[in-house]
Amino acid sequence: MKMRCGVCAGATLLSGWLGILPSPAQPSFVQVQSDGVPAQTARPEPGNALSSGTSSATATPAVAASKVPSTAYLFSYFIGNGEDGLHLAWSADGYRWEALNGGRSFLKPEVGESKLMRDPCLLLGPEGSFHMVWTTAWNGKTIGYASSADLLTWSPQQAIPVMDHEPAVLNCWAPEIFWDAQKRRFLIFWASTVTNKFLETAGQAENRYNHRMYCTTTTDFKTFAPTRLFYDPGFNVIDATLLPANGRFHLIIKDETVKPPRKHLRLAGADSPEGPFEPLKPPFTRSWVEGPTALKVGDFYLVYFDAYRDHRYEAVRSRDLETWEDISSQIAFPKGARHGTALAVPGRVIENLLSR
């Protein structure tokens, strides 16, 4: 059975100014059916939940608009509790990031149980349009979706009820979107807690949350495959992201186990974006971090993450995904930046945003 979503009144995407293909027609969502289970991400610790992670310094302008490199880097993020929506930053080198639009929001949240826009995951699709999914609420059954040709004009927002089939679901956190080039479809995955499932690890969790990763796929954002279990490592897991490297796909996850506390990042490889994944490697970060996003810069793979207890972003890098170096002292993110996504984009994408 496939699940369908009904949508808001339609607006057509701007034709892809990146010069690839025109943007796909806007989906109109609202209803769903399926048999699967979802997930989300990024939540602060109890008593520290809504505090913003910040960089160690306020990012200074990296490069003038006239000197944006042919390939630059974009970072989508939220601040506070996600009430004011999508924020964007850019970098010429992947280390120092500058807020765009004067630090103001690019898109206000309009859909979902709480109308939040947390954990925005941005993807540049093969047709030249940007696709974004996000967390709409701390508790609920939906994730948000919208698309844009230029990051300035957006399609109608949709609340996709990915967990509507599961009456006992608590949440859908930190959705991620990934283009599966082999299967020619979009993979969307997130973290969800379903009451009375995975009871073997319930005592290791907190506040009733005991997550596993769920997923769906789509080619057009109108029809979605039934939600299914995506990844179960045998413990409470959130904030997954995929890093393509050396012809393989590496799933980076947060071990959310709190009893005993782990709260660190680990990695597992696979030959396909949908797995099956190999056994997890040992942790490559300290504890009490979340919201990883990864990027290749030069010869290094950089993994950025929200050190939410210290209210800042930190990062590590590796050439081989085996040996890691802490480079937190070398990076700078906009003040208050929380769980987001880093991606490489054509320099003219940044030039267009800087010229607005």
Image (cartoon, helix red, strand yellow):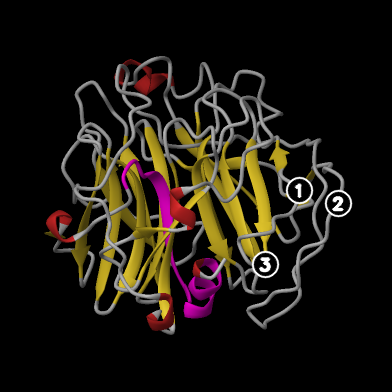
Numbered label attached to residue 10: 2
Which of the 4 quarters of the picture holds residue 325? bottom left
**336 falls in the magenta region:** yes
Q: Which residues are magenta?
A: 335-353
- From the image, tell me which residue sits under label 1: 156
| Rendered residue at 35%/76% (across/down) | 246
Tell me which label, 2 or 3, sits earlier in the chain: 2
Q: Secondary structure at mark 2?
A: loop
* Residue 107 vs residue 194, the one in the foreground: 107
Please, what is the three-letter code of the amino acid marked with disc 3? Answer: Ala
- Inspect this view and state whether residue 96 appears: yes
**313 falls in the magenta region:** no
Look at the numbered discs 1 and 2 and tell me whether their residues touch, using CB distance below 8 Å.
Answer: yes
C-alpha distance separating marks 1 and 3: 13 Å
Tell me which label, 1 or 2, sits earlier in the chain: 2
| Rendered residue at 22%/34% (across/down) | 288
- From the image, tell me which residue sits under label 3: 149
| Mark 3 Cα-neighbour bin, 10 Å: few <14, some 14–19, many ≥20 | many
C-alpha distance separating marks 1 and 2: 7 Å
Tell me which label, 1 or 3, sits earlier in the chain: 3
| Rendered residue at 26%/39% (across/down) | 289
